[in-house]
Image (cartoon, helix red, strand yellow):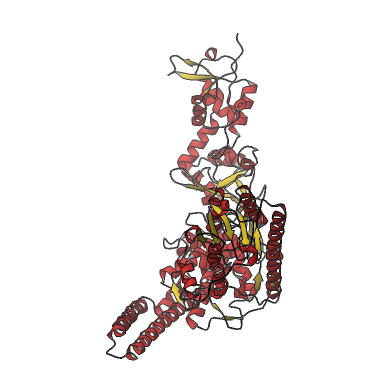
């Protein structure tokens, strides 16, 4: 018997008598009285447990009923583990599961409850209990009568009582849900107000009257306008030791203001909750029964789209920001997500245009790839890889594209450099004023708390040391907090004046004449550059012309203006240069006049020609090597070896490389991997390799050479890398 039952019984002045129907029932047999009588006690909510004490007392009084029905006191057991638990489900009801176990072990002869609905309001759970009681001949009793599940009439009556209990629950839930929904449609159903709002006694929402709370909320929005990411705002608050104002919705300090360290989730809620623009919403997270997990009451919730909300009312409550500003914030947060259709947040990588580059062939967003020991930057389109169509769609050097866009960006900013500098100075000054205001409010609150604890200490009689000692400690702690904040504020004022000095202002204005220097400075971080680019450029569409070095670039600027350009990307070979023929002709023309290689290189650079790979300009050695390469032919190579030593379709490695238009080293790598058929080595010629390739083999090798491959690509087809041997004879 529980201690709660003993307490209840101690307050009773009379002994409850059993109902006549129970006392005279012939259904109670010795086989029942030999086993336990269990009294099941349950109230649905904590509030009912606190308020409905008379109902609780009546349920515990059923112990006396069991004794008067013939059970000895030591045979009566109370199960009250399910207090403050709903009977709608058996999940989480340890007492009900314990009851089923006792019945299943044939330990129970009688189950008593003030009402049968106390046991279960779910037909599934209710019929499970009836079935067990019928098997083990356990009686059920409430204030209306005694029931034997083995008796047909009683079993039918019990089934009807269970159906009525479940139906009653659904009716009550339906009424309450419709009432809540009707209130929500008026925008008056407010459950938990977010940060920066309070709920009045009338049920209406209002902006928190605390000025410091309002300042912190405004600071979050202003910082997001400047930094553009939720994580950046949370980091800013951490760096400046700015805490979030929280009014707990439960617990001993419910409704009182607390200051806690900022968390990313709390900052995200402030930036995404539509209440901050004055819009009331209800039903944005609804329960999907298919996703519910047993035993987890909050599971199965799904975030709905605005058109599926139960209620969405604009301008219903006071707002912190305008609807237009809120919409801009949501668009920036969506763009920060790592998704194929979003730009993603600015990151620490060296890529300037990450998330902005669009493939001009398939119009998908191109990936940022860093490869090699030097982490060379490339923009790659992986459409063909994702669709299983082979190698990547197209790719190009990221360094060249970034430098090109940087030049265009600085050229666009140059006319407005002075105005931008003035705006930067104004923004920096406003940021310092906001931080200074926050410090002053923190100091004001700390001094108020110290003064309040002093008044509490003064109000206590000096002789009452039991109280005075504790208040004295609290006062001293408050004074130490004030002293600590004053020292921190003094340190802050030394490093950050509330207004820009004239020297700082002149330095900022001087930067307007040195934008390229500021852009390339080591102190300018990649995320800062990325944020500036995103302010002015919506997207960059690139289209590589075949396998040449020509790239068409389309810049979509903010405001709707579009500019089209052409740049040259680094390539592996000279024959990939779009102007290769014109380059060779120009070199021959300049050489025919007797100019030296160095002078020819200067002419080529002035006329806009450029070498392949990463070399930016021509010089004498490059021109000399190109002339020698252009003048060499396969005939010259073969002339070094007697013709009788080379049979039909046999090639030296260097000659085969020239025929395929590929580097000799790459062909040697193919030979080592077994992709080229080597017939023999020439003795006496330093073991030179002789390869065999007829017209079909040359076609296969050309197709292999033209396959663009990256680390992400699947293995090459076998027919492309398997060489064919010459026919015998």
**Which residue lies most toward the top here?**
729
Q: How many marks?
A: 0
Spot occupied by residue 340 in the image (x, y as percentages of width and height): 61, 52
- When asked about the image quadrant of residue 41, the answer is bottom right
- When asked about the image quadrant of residue 274, the answer is bottom right
Spot occupied by residue 97 in the image (x, y as percentages of width and height): 55, 54
Q: On screen, 563 above or below 689?
A: below
Q: Nearer the viewer, residue 336 or 24?
A: 24
Q: Nearer the viewer, residue 710 or 170?
A: 170
Q: On screen, 364 above or below 528?
A: above
Q: What residue sits 48% from the left and 25% below the top?
A: 672
From where the camera sits, is residue 349 visible? yes
Which image quarter is the C terminus in?
A: top right
From where the camera sits, is residue 192 visible? no
Q: What residue sits 49% from the left and 45% below the top?
A: 614
Q: On screen, 722 above or below 439?
A: above
Q: Nearer the viewer, residue 181 or 68?
A: 68
Q: Nearer the viewer, residue 467 or 8?
A: 8
Spot occupied by residue 125 in the image (x, y as percentages of width and height): 63, 54
């Amino acid at each position: 018997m529980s201690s709660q039952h003993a307490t209840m019984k101690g307050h009773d002045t009379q002994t409850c008598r059993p109902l006549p129907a129970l006392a005279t029932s012939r259904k109670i047999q010795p086989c029942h009285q030999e086993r336990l009588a269990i009294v099941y006690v349950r109230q649905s909510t904590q509030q009912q447990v606190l308020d409905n004490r008379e109902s609780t007392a009546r349920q515990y009084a059923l112990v006396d009923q069991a004794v008067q029905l013939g059970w000895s006191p030591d045979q009566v057991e109370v199960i009250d583990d399910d207090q403050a638990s709903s009977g709608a489900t058996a999940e989480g009801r340890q007492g009900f599961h314990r009851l089923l176990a006792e019945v299943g072990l044939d330990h129970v002869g009688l189950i008593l409850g003030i009402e049968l609905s106390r046991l279960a309001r779910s037909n599934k759970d209710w019929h499970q209990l009836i079935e067990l009681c019928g098997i083990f001949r356990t009686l059920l009793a409430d204030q209306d009568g005694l029931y034997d599940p083995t008796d047909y009439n009683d079993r039918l009556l019990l089934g009807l009582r269970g159906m009525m209990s479940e139906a009653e629950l659904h009716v009550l839930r339906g009424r309450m849900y419709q009432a809540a929904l009707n209130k929500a449609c008026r925008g008056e159903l407010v459950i938990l107000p977010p940060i920066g709002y309070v709920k009045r006694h009338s049920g209406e929402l209002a902006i928190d009257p605390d000025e410091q709370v309002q300042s912190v909320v405004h600071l979050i929005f202003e910082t997001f306008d400047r930094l553009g990411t939720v994580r950046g705002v949370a980091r800013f608050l951490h760096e400046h030791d700015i805490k979030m104002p929280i009014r707990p919705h439960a617990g001993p300090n419910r409704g009182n203001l607390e200051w806690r360290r900022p968390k990313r989730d709390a900052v995200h809620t402030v930036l995404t909750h539509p209440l901050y623009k004055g819009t009331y919403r209800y039903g944005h997270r609804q329960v999907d029964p298919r996703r519910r997990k047993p035993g987890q009451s909050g599971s199965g919730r799904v975030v709905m789209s605005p058109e599926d909300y139960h209620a969405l009312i604009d301008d219903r409550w006071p707002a912190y920001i305008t609807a237009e500003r809120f919409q801009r914030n949501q668009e920036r947060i969506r763009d920060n997500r790592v998704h194929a259709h979003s730009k993603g947040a600015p990151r620490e990588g060296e890529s300037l245009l990450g998330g902005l580059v669009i493939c001009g062939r398939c119009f998908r967003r191109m990936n940022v790839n860093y490869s090699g020991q030097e982490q060379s930057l490339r923009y790659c389109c992986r459409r063909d890889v994702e669709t299983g169509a082979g190698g990547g769609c197209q790719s190009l050097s990221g360094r060249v594209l970034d430098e090109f866009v940087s030049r265009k960006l600085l050229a666009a900013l140059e006319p407005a450099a002075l105005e931008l500098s003035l705006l930067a100075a104004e923004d920096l000054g406003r940021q310092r004023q906001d931080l200074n205001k926050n410090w002053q409010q923190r100091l004001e609150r700390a001094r108020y708390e110290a003064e309040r604890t002093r008044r509490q200490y003064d109000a206590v009689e000096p002789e009452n040391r039991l109280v005075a000692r504790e208040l004295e400690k609290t006062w001293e702690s408050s004074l130490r907090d004030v002293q600590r904040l004053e020292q921190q504020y003094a340190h802050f004022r030394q490093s950050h004046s509330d207004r820009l000095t004239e020297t700082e202002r002149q330095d900022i204005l001087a930067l307007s004449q040195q934008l390229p220097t500021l852009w390339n400075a080591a102190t300018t971080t990649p995320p800062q550059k990325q944020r500036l680019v995103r302010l002015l450029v919506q997207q960059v569409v690139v289209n590589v012309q075949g396998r040449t070095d020509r790239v068409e670039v389309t810049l979509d600027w903010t405001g709707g203006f579009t500019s089209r350009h052409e740049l040259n990307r680094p390539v592996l070979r000279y024959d990939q240069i779009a102007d290769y023929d014109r380059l060779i002709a120009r070199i021959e023309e300049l050489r025919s006049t007797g100019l030296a290689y160095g002078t020819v290189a200067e002419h080529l650079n002035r006329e806009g020609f450029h070498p392949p790979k990463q070399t930016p300009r021509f010089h004498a050695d490059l021109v000399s090597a190109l002339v020698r390469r252009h003048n060499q032919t396969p005939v010259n190579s073969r002339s070094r070896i007697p013709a009788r030593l080379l049979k039909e379709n046999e090639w030296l490695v260097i000659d085969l490389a020239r025929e395929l238009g590929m580097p000799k080293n790459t062909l040697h790598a193919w030979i080592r991997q077994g992709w080229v058929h080597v017939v023999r080595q020439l003795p006496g010629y330093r073991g030179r390799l002789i390869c065999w390739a007829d017209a079909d083999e040359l076609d296969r090798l050309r197709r292999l050479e033209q396959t663009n491959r990256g680390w992400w690509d699947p293995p090459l087809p076998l027919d492309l890398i398997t060489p064919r041997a010459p026919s015998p004879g």
